[in-house]
């Protein structure tokens, strides 16, 4: 009988994408494994990219605690052999208490269980006292793999390259995006100027300057519907910029990242998508601690400052007299030089 695995990771985009690397390890160790995944319903769509996942369980937050318990009972009926809590939050603890009760773990019965620790004490030491006990740079993909070593899963030599996108999605992107690219497609650079938190965003003025000093290139912007500042970037050279902010969903945006020549992004989910898809990217890293990529095809641009990192995700306040100095000092001229080197290589 094939082994059945459940991966618990509800959000966010970047963390789910980084966690998806565990599927490679599981299938390298157990080629016939049946893998299930539970994610937040609004985050679950792009897990369909990897058709090696047998079933994606979408959790609807609107159903609350009762809905979570009902779903836990459904999952229990699946009789999983292995349960990996890759989230370690209140919801995953509820699932764990139903699927793998503590008393069963004590006696070694029921599903085998492992969990990705959030290392809260280490985080307090780092962000409150500047005492670093993490391996730096901290690479999320590797941290999601580590708990599986408990089950002897260590081989990640064979990775998925056959990403699935529905035919109607590809047709939509051909009609609504690629046919509207402004300029030579081989000179197209994908920009991801937004992020969940303001402090880890590269300044809008830097994006504008980058566009202006690269007149031979054209650009595509990926962002959400609330990222109205993207219009300011677009206005810098509207004839060379295709602004897709708010016009694509998560799965469509992942497809566009996969088709990109080069992605420029801060610490975002789409940066990690480029890492996963083996797409070249420039990573603009500032205040955050845990957003570093793994692949050699990604180049990280950062400045050495004693206050870095100061936050896990970009929330909080900048302590410097110059707000976001760690991002400001990654100059447009520097990024432009890197763009030319990558695109001409």
Image (cartoon, rainbow, N blue to C red):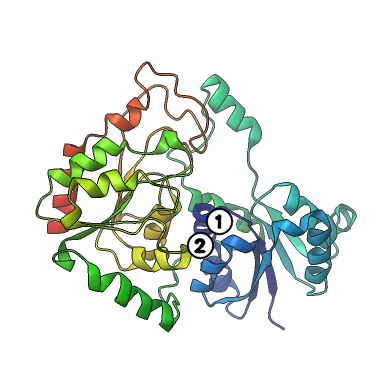
> Is 289 above or below relative to 171?
above
Q: Nearer the viewer, residue 166 or 237?
A: 237
What's the CA distance linking mark 2 and mark 1?
7 Å
Q: Secondary structure at mark 1?
A: helix
Residue 251 x %, y %: 46, 67
Q: Secondary structure at mark 2?
A: helix
Looking at the image, how many numbered discs can be counted on the residues?
A: 2
Quadrant assignment for the N terminus: bottom right
Q: Residues within 10 Å of mark 1 (few under 14, many from 20)?
A: many
Check contact, mark 2 vs mark 1: CB within 8 A.
yes
Mark closer to the observer (2, 1)? 2
Q: Is residue 345 visible?
A: no
Residue 49 x %, y %: 49, 72
Residue drawn at x 43%, y 74% is 163
> Is 269 above or below relative to 29?
above
- Identify residue for label 1: 145
> Is 168 above or below relative to 226?
below
| Rendered image: mark on residue 310 | none
The image quadrant that residue 254 belongs to is bottom left
Residue drawn at x 28%, y 43% is 232
Q: Residues within 10 Å of mark 2 (few under 14, many from 20)?
A: some
Q: Residue 166 vs residue 26: left or right?
A: left
Residue 88 x %, y %: 69, 48
Q: Residue 261 vs residue 96: left or right?
A: left
Counting residues from the start of the chain, the first of labels 2 and 1 encountered is 2
Q: Of all residues shown, which one is farthest toward the left?
A: 216
- Identify residue for label 2: 21
Residue drawn at x 37%, y 44% is 266
């Amino acid at each position: 009988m094939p082994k059945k695995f459940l991966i618990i990771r509800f959000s966010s985009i970047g963390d789910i994408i980084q966690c998806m690397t565990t599927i490679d390890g599981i299938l390298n160790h157990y080629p016939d494994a049946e893998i299930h995944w539970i994610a937040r319903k609004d985050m679950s769509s792009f897990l369909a990219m990897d058709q090696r996942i047998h079933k994606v369980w979408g959790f609807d937050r609107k159903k609350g605690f009762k809905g979570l318990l009902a779903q836990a009972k459904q999952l229990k009926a699946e009789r999983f052999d292995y349960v990996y809590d890759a989230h370690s939050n209140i919801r995953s603890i509820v699932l764990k208490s139903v699927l793998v009760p503590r008393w069963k773990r004590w006696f070694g019965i029921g599903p085998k269980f492992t969990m990705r620790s959030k290392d809260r004490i280490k985080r307090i030491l780092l962000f409150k006292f500047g005492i670093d006990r993490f391996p730096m740079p901290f690479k999320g993909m590797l941290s999601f793999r580590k708990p599986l070593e408990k089950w002897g899963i260590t081989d990640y030599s064979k990775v998925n390259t056959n990403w699935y996108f529905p035919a109607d999605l590809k047709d939509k992107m051909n009609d609504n995006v690629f046919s509207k690219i402004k300029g030579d497609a081989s000179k197209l650079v994908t920009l991801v100027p937004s992020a969940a938190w303001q402090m880890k965003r590269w300044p809008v003025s830097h994006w504008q300057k980058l566009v202006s000093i690269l007149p031979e290139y054209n650009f595509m912007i990926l962002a959400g519907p609330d990222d109205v500042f993207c219009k300011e970037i677009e206005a810098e050279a509207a004839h060379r910029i295709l602004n897709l902010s708010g016009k694509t969903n998560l799965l469509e945006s992942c497809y566009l990242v996969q088709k990109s020549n080069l992605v420029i992004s801060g610490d975002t989910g789409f940066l990690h998508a480029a890492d996963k898809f083996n797409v070249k990217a420039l990573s603009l890293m500032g205040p955050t601690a845990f957003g570093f990529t793994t692949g050699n095809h990604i180049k990280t641009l950062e400045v050495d400052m004693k206050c870095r990192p100061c936050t896990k995700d970009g929330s909080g306040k900048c302590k410097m007299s110059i707000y976001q100095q760690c991002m400001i000092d990654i100059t447009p001229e520097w990024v432009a030089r890197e763009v030319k080197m990558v695109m001409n290589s």
